[in-house]
Amino acid sequence: TQAPVNVTVTGAAGQIGYALLFRIASGQLLGPDTPVKLRLLEIPQAVKAAEGTALELEDGAFPLLAGIDIFDDAKQAFAGANVALLVGARPRTKGMERADLLEANGGIFKPQGEAINAGAADDIRVLVVGNPANTNALIAQSHAPDVPAERFTAMTRLDHNRAVAQLAKKLNAPVGEIKKLTIWGNHSASQYPDIFHAEVAGKNAAEAVNDEKWLAEEFIPRVAKRGAEIIEARGASSAASAANAAIDHIYNWVNGTPEGDWTSMAVPSDGSYGVPEGLISSFPVVCKDGKYEIVQGLEINEFSRGRIDASVNELAEEREAVKKLGLI
Ligand code: NDP
């Protein structure tokens, strides 16, 4: 059998962490042949709760779980990490200004980037889930100069999965028949779910929908505001679906996207589609041999162009804001 892969998870005692860790331990993150060692990072007050989750993980008797270590120090938690899932973040609280939010998260993601730079394995892959995810990823990346920039990604897979599900519902099609949908831009209310290149059972999905009013007034806002809909219904924010999306993101990155399909990941821009270089923005990507590539050459119509630009502009503003704060 293979040597265990070190998976570091931050915010391990949180809601998403609780759902995520069991999926990782059962082999769904990397596949059924890959043993994993979990390295959990928490703030000191939450270490005890993380220890509780570790007891439950032990009680799962997962054959692929080769060990669990718990830390409150980033340097130790990221030592030897092959995969890092950065879930813990400072949530926006009532009355909090954006600059305060960015600053608080700078205090988390700067030292984590430094720790990844100092001690992670050469093949480290980073997924940032904690919000504002794209900009948190940018902060971490800018403090890890020795790690190739493309190893830092942020999660828009939950938005992608939500959009696939909503489109399938509208078209009365099984979700498995929806392909090539794209989330562009920021993981925020400005994100743009694009169905113009999407396919349903091999046919163009936008043509199959043929309803621009539904697209503009129902589909796009529904996907973008799904988080609020979940909070309203559950009385708590989405957790299991976010964990599921994190699993999907890493699984596809490592094991590839299916032939004839792509997925959405927020990755450092190489300037494709007019997105300023270096912004961590969501794109259509194909994964193969453990690497991702931005899908090239898609035609962007006017409807899409304005929406992509609006979300990308928001990312550019966030980058300016963290630059001003000295966080990158
Ligand atoms: P959750 O586990 O519910 O959420 C964690 C982060 O994921 C939040 O930033 C949340 O953003 C984000 N997120 C991204 N996408 C989604 C989505 N679709 N739905 C819901 N959340 C999403 O938070 P908890 O408060 O339960 O747990 C956070 C844990 O992190 C705590 O245990 C805390 O101690 C820990 N923490 C650890 C740190 C560290 O290891 N250094 C640093 C900071 C916190 P949003 O708030 O916008 O929903």
Image (cartoon, rainbow, N blue to C red):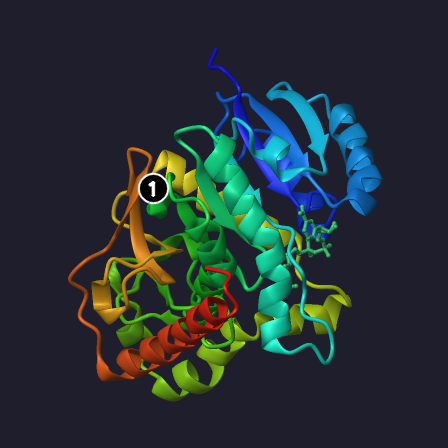
112 to 228, vertically: above or below = above
Q: Is residue 174 left or right of residue 242?
A: left
Looking at the rendering, the quadrant in which ligand 1 lies is bottom right
Q: Is residue 161 left or right of residue 8?
A: left
284 or 88, nearer to the observer? 88
Residue receiving disc 1? 148
* Residue 273, quarter of the rendered image: bottom left
Q: Position of residue 75 (x, y in %)?
A: 60, 35
Q: Position of residue 99 (x, y in %)?
A: 59, 74
* Residue 171, quarter of the rendered image: bottom left
The answer to whether one can see residue 149 in this image is yes
92 or 319, nearer to the observer? 319
Element assignment for label 1: loop
53 to 176, vertically: above or below = above
Q: Position of residue 292 (x, y in %)?
A: 30, 45
The answer to whether one can see residue 155 in this image is no
* Residue 35, quarter of the rendered image: top right
* Disc 1 Cβ-to-ligand 1 distance below 8 Å: no
User: In which quadrant is the C terminus drawn?
Assistant: bottom left
| Residue at point 62%, 39% (across, down) | 74
Q: Position of residue 77 (x, y in %)?
A: 62, 33
Question: Looking at the picture, which amino acid does disc 1 mark?
Answer: Pro
Number of numbered discs present? 1
| Residue at point 82%, 41% (across, down) | 49
